Image (tube, coloured by chain):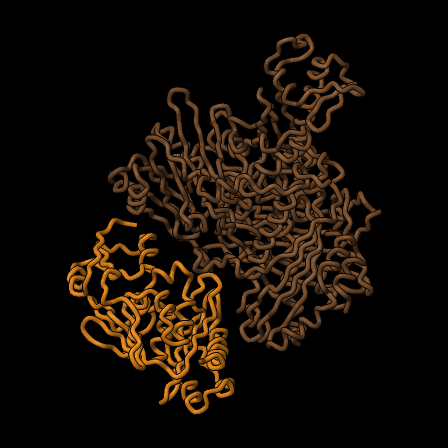
Chain colours: A orange, B brown
């Protein structure tokens, strides 16, 4: 790790000011950035911690909307128990150390193709709130490690409409325990959304055939005969394209069966 | 009344208090005054010619004290293989030089070609990053079959990638071939024994200190065998006289084989310490550990089992390619040969066995002995092909094994693979297994699993292994370049407490607790007054360290012999003190007494007299009470076992979960049952890791794909079941004084085939009868792909 400057502002304006300098980088829980820096693969001159900004902390449930501060840890999201799919997802990320450090804003800003939160955000049609604008999840995710965020832009909150029923199924990659494939199913009055993480070369995506079938008939049988095109799937040490495509179908079915 | 101390009891491991409260002292915990830090520049290509290493920028960077390249060690000896293997045609193995730092060529990713020593590790790393290495990349030789076919050579000077082509036993070859040709049934299986990374929790580390006044060196290093490391450095590599080099391996956080060997980093810090007259420290990062610790296994094997229609075994024939990586690590040549081929008769009365092993150089990290070392490879091949055979002949897998077992009255038994098993009772082990495991309820459990959409399989295995590697006379004939005895010194101090200096090294095994139990039993003194000293060549006698489950069988025997000498001398002193003849002195429960009288002396009183020898028979006896014994065994020891496990397979995802695991082992006599149980637990965990999770993989260009915990899957608690472990079927070893056999590797040897046999059984129960084998690790994708192929 190279030397760096560390600041921990207490409000968003100060954070933005600190991030304005060249080679400054925002730091959430540091679950990706710190190991990368230890390997000398990243060398920001200044780290701007977002964990001291109180307005970015906490989970608020008002009516049918859950608002989660961008610097809220996975453990705190799990503890808030806003709705079952989200609670299940947050309580299954990594291990206790990760959950007590990692933040929802950090996860969404990084958009690792195997991270869990992108599936929840996309499947719920969440709104990503930044210091300057609001971005719909459908517009936010733009491929592996790529998002609509601009150079100096902070995720201050995530707004999630509470589904009627939801569930997240993760099949863990045996080594990292990230999602080899993760499926978030969310049922709303106007239809069902299904988002898949871990599987595609293009990052998190919505499985539209499953959404259409489940919107008509929210049951395991509705999707059991569907299949996903394997050609866009990731192939690596832990799974072939065909295997990942199979897991998408199997886990979607299990998410439907478990949705509550 | 049951014993409450000594042999056969389970005092808690006294070293654990230190370890669990953060008071262990590992190499990286040691910091010396004036210490500097070494960081290595490592190749990021698998194979290439070093044209130039430009250090001109790096050497002028802040804090830099010295930079070394391969050129600096060009005249220094290579790090040798410890065992000379001859090919079938009598030609000695190819033995290219393994230099301290790569010179001329880099041969695997991670091969160190330069090292920087600086005031801080960070400054050294900065300078390493500034070294400009001009390396012409060559195509990498990774796959063993391709390597043998020719093309690029890992070592150009030997003109082949084949290290040796070994046959065992060559004289049995024709008979075995003929037996297989005419056999009524032959089962053939091709399999891969997957390459694994040892992953000791403590990475390798070394600190060298040089005394410019005396010319003495001290090397603190993460070694399983400090004397062996010293011998290699002194006699082969740097030429430092043995009496000028002290090697200390303090607390060591796991080795599993990978810390047996001498590595170039140790030589580098020693040379640097002398040059700078300052201590030089190096601690491996986890990435360096993945790239450069000697890996394990990596065999590609075809095995054939010939038998009668009723299952009577006629012959085993094995063809194996064994990857030795880019350089020969110290035990890399004996592991796939004598530690593997000699076990290829298993527990069976098979008359014909022939094993061919071709060792292959590749552009990968060196491969060497890893927990079990050759015997897991042997057991896996045998027990997988036997299981396949049982299925082909519709025979019960337990009955097929029982049918071919060596029977208790046949011991000592000369196996067709050239070993003489001293004792064993394999049927008794299966009897015990059948007593413990509810085989009768298996069908109900299978039905319950199926109700949940899962398949359930039962896996059976038996194994035999050879531990306590010996005897020196024999292994010398077979090519060993070292002796394989061990040594112990028992020092009774004046005040009666005892220090026992042992050649064995504990890096997790619990020697500090178990060895005192032996001495305590013999001397009748409180085991808490006995301390074990190990891991420092300036304190202990010349012993060979710990590996191959040898500590108790070999070094423990030396402890017994030294303690017997103590008793003999103390008896003489007691006879003088009691004014009786030596023959009338009885020693029991720590007391010397004169037979038929009430005159007695406590052991401590006799010890005190030895050190305060007033009124002492100086003309007959020396003062002091300290004895050393070297012990060279008459034979290997032969632990054996019967294992069973049940797995569930999720056919939709291919996920395998281990539902139960039962291990019945014959370790001979057991000193501390709790420690033995723990050793078995650890071994099974490691075996399940190999069977289900661990997969060291290089791509075609020689890049290590599984180079971190993000891609290399280690077993975690949640992957493992509660184990049912039994070691009550003890058939004591007939040739060592404790009757012990060794337990450290058994679990890792016996468990992988048990797991894979169970997975195949589960798939067959689900109608997937086309699946006769799945290579390890039996990962979800492999199981699912096998089902859906």
Query: Which quadrant would the C terminus of chain B be assigned to in this image?
Result: bottom right
* Residue drawn at 74 percent across, 21 percent down: B593
Question: Residue lying farthest front?
Answer: B598
Name the quadrant containing residue A91: bottom left
Where does residue B544 sit, x and y in percent of width and height? 59, 34
Name the quadrant containing residue B782: bottom right
Task: Say above or below: B63 vs B452.
Answer: above
Where does residue A156 sit, x and y in percent of width and height? 24, 69
Task: Say above or below: B263 vs B455.
Answer: above
Using residue B313 as the reference point, say whether residue B332 is left or right of it. Answer: left
Where does residue B556 sit, x and y in percent of width and height? 65, 34
Question: Residue lying farthest right?
Answer: B409
Residue B264 visible somewhere in the drawing: no
Query: Which quadrant would the N terminus of chain B be assigned to in this image?
Result: top right
Using residue A175 as the reference point, say whether residue B379 is left or right of it. Answer: right
* Residue drawn at 35 percent across, 80 percent down: A162
Residue A205 visible somewhere in the drawing: yes
């Amino acid at each position: 790790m190279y030397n760096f400057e560390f600041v921990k502002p207490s409000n968003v304006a100060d954070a933005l000011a600190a991030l304005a300098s060249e080679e400054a980088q925002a730091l959430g829980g540091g679950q990706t950035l710190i190991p990368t820096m230890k390997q000398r693969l990243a060398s920001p001159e200044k780290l701007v911690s977002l964990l001291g900004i109180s307005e970015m902390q906490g989970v608020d449930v008002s009516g049918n909307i859950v608002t989660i501060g961008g610097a809220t840890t996975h453990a705190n999201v799990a503890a808030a128990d806003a709705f079952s799919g989200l609670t299940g997802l947050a309580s299954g990320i990594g291990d206790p150390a990760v959950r007590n450090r990692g933040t929802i804003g950090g996860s969404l800003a990084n958009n690792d193709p195997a991270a869990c939160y992108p599936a929840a955000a996309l499947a719920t049609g969440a709104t990503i709130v930044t210091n300057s604008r609001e971005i719909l999840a459908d517009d936010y995710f733009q491929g592996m490690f790529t998002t609509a965020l601009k150079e100096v832009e902070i995720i201050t909150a995530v707004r999630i409409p509470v589904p009627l029923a939801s569930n997240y199924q993760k099949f863990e990659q045996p080594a990292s325990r990230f999602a080899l494939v993760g499926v978030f199913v969310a049922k709303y009055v106007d239809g069902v959304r299904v988002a898949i993480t871990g599987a595609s070369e293009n990052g998190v995506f919505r499985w539209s055939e499953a959404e259409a079938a489940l919107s008509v008939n929210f049951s395991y049988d509705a999707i059991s005969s569907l299949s996903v095109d394997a050609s866009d799937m990731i192939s690596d040490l832990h799974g072939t394209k065909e295997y990942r495509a199979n897991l998408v179908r199997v886990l979607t079915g299990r998410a439907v069966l478990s949705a509550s | 009344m049951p014993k409450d101390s000594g042999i056969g009891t389970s005092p808690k491991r006294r070293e654990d208090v230190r370890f669990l409260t953060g008071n262990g002292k590992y190499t990286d915990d040691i910091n010396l005054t004036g210490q500097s830090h070494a960081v290595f520049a490592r190749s990021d290509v698998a194979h290439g010619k070093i044209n130039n290493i430009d250090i001109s920028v790096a050497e002028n960077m802040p804090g830099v004290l010295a930079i070394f390249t391969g050129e600096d060690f060009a005249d220094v000896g290579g790090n040798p293989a410890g065992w000379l293997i001859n090919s079938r045609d009598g030609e000695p193995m190819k033995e290219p030089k393994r230099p301290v730092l790569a010179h001329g060529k880099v041969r695997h990713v991670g091969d160190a070609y330069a090292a920087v020593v600086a005031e801080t590790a960070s400054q050294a790393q900065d300078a390493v990053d500034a070294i400009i290495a001009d390396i012409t990349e060559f195509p990498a030789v990774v796959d063993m079959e391709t390597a043998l076919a020719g093309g690029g050579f890992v070592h150009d000077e030997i003109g082949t990638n084949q290290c040796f082509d070994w046959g065992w036993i060559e004289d049995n070859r024709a008979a075995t071939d003929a037996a297989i040709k005419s056999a009524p049934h032959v089962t053939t299986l091709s399999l891969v024994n997957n390459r694994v990374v040892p992953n000791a929790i403590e990475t390798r580390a070394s600190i060298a200190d040089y005394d410019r006044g005396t010319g003495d060196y001290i090397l603190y290093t993460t070694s399983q065998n400090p004397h062996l490391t010293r011998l290699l450095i002194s006699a082969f590599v740097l030429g430092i006289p043995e009496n000028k080099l002290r090697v200390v391996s303090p607390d060591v956080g796991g080795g599993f084989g990978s810390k047996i060997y001498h590595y170039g980093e140790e030589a580098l810090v020693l040379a640097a310490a002398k040059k700078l007259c300052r201590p030089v420290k190096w601690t491996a990062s986890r990435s360096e550990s993945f790239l450069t610790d000697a890996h394990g296994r990596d065999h590609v094997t075809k095995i054939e089992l010939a038998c009668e229609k009723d299952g009577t075994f006629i012959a085993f024939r094995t063809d194996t390619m064994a990857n030795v990586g880019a350089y020969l690590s110290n035990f890399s040549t004996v592991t796939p040969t004598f530690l593997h081929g000699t076990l290829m008769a298993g527990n069976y009365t098979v008359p014909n066995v022939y094993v061919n092993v071709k060792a292959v150089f590749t552009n990968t990290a060196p491969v060497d002995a890893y927990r079990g070392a050759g015997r897991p490879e042997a057991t896996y091949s045998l027990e997988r092909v036997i299981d396949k055979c049982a299925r082909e002949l519709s025979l019960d897998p337990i009955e097929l094994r029982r049918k071919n077992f060596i029977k208790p009255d046949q011991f000592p038994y000369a196996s067709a693979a050239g070993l003489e098993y001293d004792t064993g009772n394999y049927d008794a082990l299966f009897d015990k297994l059948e007593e413990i495991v509810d085989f009768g309820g298996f069908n109900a459990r299978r039905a319950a699993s199926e109700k949940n959409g899962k398949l359930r399989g039962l896996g059976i295995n038996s194994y035999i292994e050879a531990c306590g590697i010996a005897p020196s006379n024999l292994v010398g004939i077979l090519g060993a370049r070292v002796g394989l005895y061990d040594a112990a010194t028992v020092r009774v101090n004046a005040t009666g407490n005892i220090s026992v200096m042992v050649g064995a090294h504990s890096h997790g095994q619990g020697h500090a607790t178990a060895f005192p139990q032996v001495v305590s039993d013999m001397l009748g003194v409180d085991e808490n007054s006995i301390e074990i000293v190990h891991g420092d060549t300036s304190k202990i006698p010349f012993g060979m360290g710990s590996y191959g489950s040898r500590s108790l069988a070999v070094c423990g025997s030396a402890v017994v012999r030294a303690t017997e000498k103590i008793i003999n001398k103390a008896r003489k002193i007691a006879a003088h003190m009691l004014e009786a003849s030596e023959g009338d002195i009885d020693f029991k429960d720590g007391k010397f007494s004169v037979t038929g009288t009430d005159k007695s002396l406590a052991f401590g009183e006799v010890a005190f007299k030895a050190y305060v020898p007033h009124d002492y028979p100086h003309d007959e006896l020396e003062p002091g009470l300290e004895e050393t014994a070297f012990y060279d065994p008459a034979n290997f020891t032969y632990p054996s076992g019967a294992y069973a496990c049940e797995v569930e397979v999720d056919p939709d995802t291919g996920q395998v979960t281990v539902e139960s695991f039962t291990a019945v082992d014959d370790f001979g006599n057991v000193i501390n049952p709790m420690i033995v149980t723990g050793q078995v637990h650890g071994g099974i965990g490691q075996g399940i890791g190999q069977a289900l999770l661990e997969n060291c993989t290089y791509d075609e260009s020689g890049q290590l794909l599984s180079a971190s915990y993000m891609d290399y899957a280690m077993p975690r608690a949640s992957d493992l079941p509660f184990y049912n472990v039994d070691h009550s079927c003890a058939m004591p070893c007939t040739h060592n004084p404790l009757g012990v056999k060794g337990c450290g590797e058994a679990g890792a040897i016996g468990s992988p085939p048990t797991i894979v046999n169970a997975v195949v059984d589960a798939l067959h129960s689900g109608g997937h009868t086309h699946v006769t084998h799945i290579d390890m690790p039996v990962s979800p994708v492999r199981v699912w792909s096998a089902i859906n192929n």
